[in-house]
């Protein structure tokens, strides 16, 4: 876990006295679950920090272009190789040419033009979510009162995660997981020998990611340490979950393959993996297909669920913002037939509402689903970042949490202020918005995420009122690569809508 010191980095302050000779301090910091918050405080004083023998963390948003921009010579760090399986997926492939090949293969599946084809799948899942929330509705809360404990009967975080898992499985694989119907995330996994087993998807997914986020900073020692620590119950539990997770995308891919071979064709992610837009086979290795399905189920559900939870939470905690958003949504839907009897708002009706998008983006800024800095490696000949030469082979990163709390760009950065994203001033902030990363390696599923966030938030906040245990209650957040969120119990009741014209 000690690495050769890279010459040329001694001029940068260490975030810890031992950071210049070992990655252990950064691993210890990762175990606190508050890594990026700690770095953000240090970056208020130091624009660049040394976080390991060959690693730098940046706190100046001008570095985003140099590290992540379309023309950057930096590539993904070895960290992605360490955690990869037998085949790379779009998010962990390092080679730029291989990444371009993969992105070309998948771009048709994620294209904006496919949103119309996906919307009915998203709407179906929102209907199922609403069906459950309707059963949780209680009497309206009196002004100034606190909810009774028994009325906090909707675990919002869990159910919105069921929604994103059901939605991405349908969008990507035309698979009906049924989590919203059964109220749990029990699925079937498939081992490499073909035997199957039942497990709970949500803990399997999140604990797998958590263990990686704690140990991956050991780099070349990772494979050894990842096994040795299993003698400790804390790590062994996470390792058992990781074994369960590995078989889940394998089973989902296997089932979809059987349907594909039987002649089923759908405009989904799997179809794009199997055939190009002309119907010619892509001839991808089966391991590569499973890897792509794995990252789709992981990134395609976890980050959007975090975003929906945080957006709703911030709006509940900021009643004036909630009022403005409801006025905008109600006005857009006044005398509209785009809301069916199950309360689902049509995406086409609300996708261009500026305040709705501002609320989503402000929540994504305040708590980016992936706060951790995504490491990039400088080229062999080195490169310039913020005008300074950085030697080759150095891991460089900027945390989205750090970028989004820079006061010179986002005044009152710790506050939820959706208005900052409106108009030309809002457009000027986009280069510093890292919630979907940036450049050629930016999130390919961004459009799907916005589709789901937009329809869910608009539909639920138009139909319901929510209350937290107390007005100042906040959710527990544990940083891995993404946030792991605690439970979010809320009281919910049907909202009394007033006609916009009469208000």
Image (cartoon, rainbow, N blue to C red):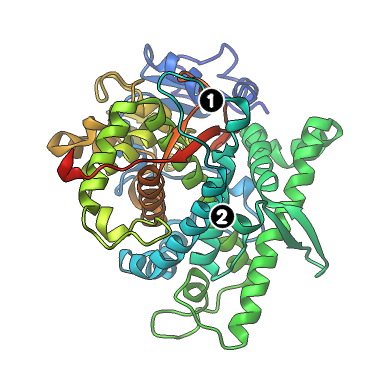
Viewer-closest of 384 and 485: 485
Q: Provide residue 332's location: percent of width, then percent of height.
A: 21, 51
Q: Secondary structure at mark 2?
A: helix
Q: Decide: is 43 above or below 428.
A: above
Q: Decide: is 339 above or below 381.
A: below
Viewer-closest of 153 and 315: 153
Residue 265 in view here: yes
Quarter containing the C terminus: top left
Q: Provide residue 259's location: percent of width, then percent of height.
A: 62, 81
Horizontal side of residue 501 vs 402, given as left or right: left
Horizontal side of residue 426 vs 261, given as left or right: left
Residue at figure coordinates x 33%, y 59% from the top left: 339
Q: Decide: is 209 above or below 24.
A: below
Q: Secondary structure at mark 1?
A: loop
Number of the label disc, if any, that sits on residue 165: 2
Q: Provide residue 39's location: percent of width, then percent of height.
A: 47, 20
The residue mark sitting in front, 2 or 1, is 1
Q: Provide residue 393's location: percent of width, then percent of height.
A: 48, 38
Query: Within 10 angstroms of label 2, few (less than 14), some, or many (20 or more) residues?
Result: many
Residue at figure coordinates x 65%, y 66% from the top left: 252
Number of the label disc, if any, that sits on residue 147: 1
Residue at figure coordinates x 63%, y 46% from the top left: 82
Mark 2–mark 1 distance (CA, rounded to whole Å): 30 Å
Number of the label disc, if any, that sits on residue 489: none
Horizontal side of residue 464 vs 167, given as left or right: left
Q: Based on the displayed image, in which of its 4 quarters is residue 276 positioned? A: bottom left
Residue at figure coordinates x 52%, y 77% from the top left: 274
Whether tag 2 and tag 1 are in contact, CB under 8 A, the answer is no
Residue lying at the far bottom of the rendered structure: 263
Quarter containing the N terminus: top right
Horizontal side of residue 498 vs 314, given as left or right: left
């Amino acid at each position: 876990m000690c690495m050769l010191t890279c010459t040329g980095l001694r001029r940068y302050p260490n975030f810890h006295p031992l950071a210049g000779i070992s990655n252990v301090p950064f691993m210890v910091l990762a175990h606190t679950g508050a890594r990026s918050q700690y770095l953000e405080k240090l970056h208020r004083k130091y624009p660049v920090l040394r976080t390991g023998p060959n690693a730098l963390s940046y706190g100046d948003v001008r570095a985003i272009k140099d590290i992540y921009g379309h023309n950057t010579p930096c590539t993904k760090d070895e960290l992605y190789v360490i955690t990869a399986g037998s085949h790379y997926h779009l998010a962990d492939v390092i080679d730029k040419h291989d990444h371009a090949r993969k992105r070309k293969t998948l771009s048709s599946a994620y294209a904006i033009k496919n949103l119309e084809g996906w919307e009915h799948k998203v709407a179906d899942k929102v209907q199922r979510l609403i069906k459950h929330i309707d059963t949780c509705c209680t009497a309206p809360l009196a002004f100034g009162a606190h909810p009774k404990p028994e009325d906090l009967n909707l675990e919002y975080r869990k159910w919105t995660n069921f929604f994103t898992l059901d939605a991405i499985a349908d969008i990507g694989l035309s698979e009906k997981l049924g989590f919203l119907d059964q109220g749990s995330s029990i699925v079937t996994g498939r081992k490499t020998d073909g035997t199957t087993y039942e497990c709970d998807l949500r803990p399997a997914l999140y604990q797998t990611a958590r263990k990686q986020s704690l140990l991956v900073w050991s780099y070349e020692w990772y494979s050894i340490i990842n096994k040795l620590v299993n003698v400790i119950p804390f790590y062994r539990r996470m390792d058992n979950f990781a074994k369960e997770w590995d078989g889940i995308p394998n089973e989902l891919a296997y089932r979809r393959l059987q349907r594909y071979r039987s002649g089923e064709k759908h405009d989904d992610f799997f179809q794009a993996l199997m055939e190009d837009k002309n119907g010619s086979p892509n001839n991808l290795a089966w391991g590569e297909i499973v890897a792509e399905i794995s990252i789709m189920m992981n990134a395609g559900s976890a980050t959007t669920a975090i975003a929906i939870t945080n957006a709703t939470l911030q709006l509940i905690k900021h009643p004036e913002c909630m009022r403005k958003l409801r006025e905008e949504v109600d006005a857009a839907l006044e005398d509209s037939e785009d809301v069916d009897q199950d309360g689902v708002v049509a995406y086409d009706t609300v996708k261009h509402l500026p305040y709705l998008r501002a609320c989503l983006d402000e929540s994504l800024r305040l708590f980016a689903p992936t706060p951790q800095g995504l490491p990039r490696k400088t080229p062999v000949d080195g490169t310039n970042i913020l005008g300074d030469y950085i030697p080759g082979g150095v891991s460089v990163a900027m945390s989205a949490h750090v970028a989004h709390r820079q006061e010179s760009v986002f005044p009152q950065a710790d506050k939820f202020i959706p208005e900052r994203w409106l108009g030309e001033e809002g457009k000027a902030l986009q280069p510093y918005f890292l919630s979907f990363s940036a450049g050629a390696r930016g999130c390919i599923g961004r459009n799907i995420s916005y589709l789901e966030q937009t329809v869910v938030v608009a539909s639920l906040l138009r139909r319901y009122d929510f209350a937290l245990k107390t007005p100042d209650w906040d959710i527990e957040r544990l940083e891995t690569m993404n946030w792991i969120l605690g439970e979010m119990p809320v009281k919910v009741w049907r909202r009394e809508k007033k006609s916009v014209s009469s208000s």
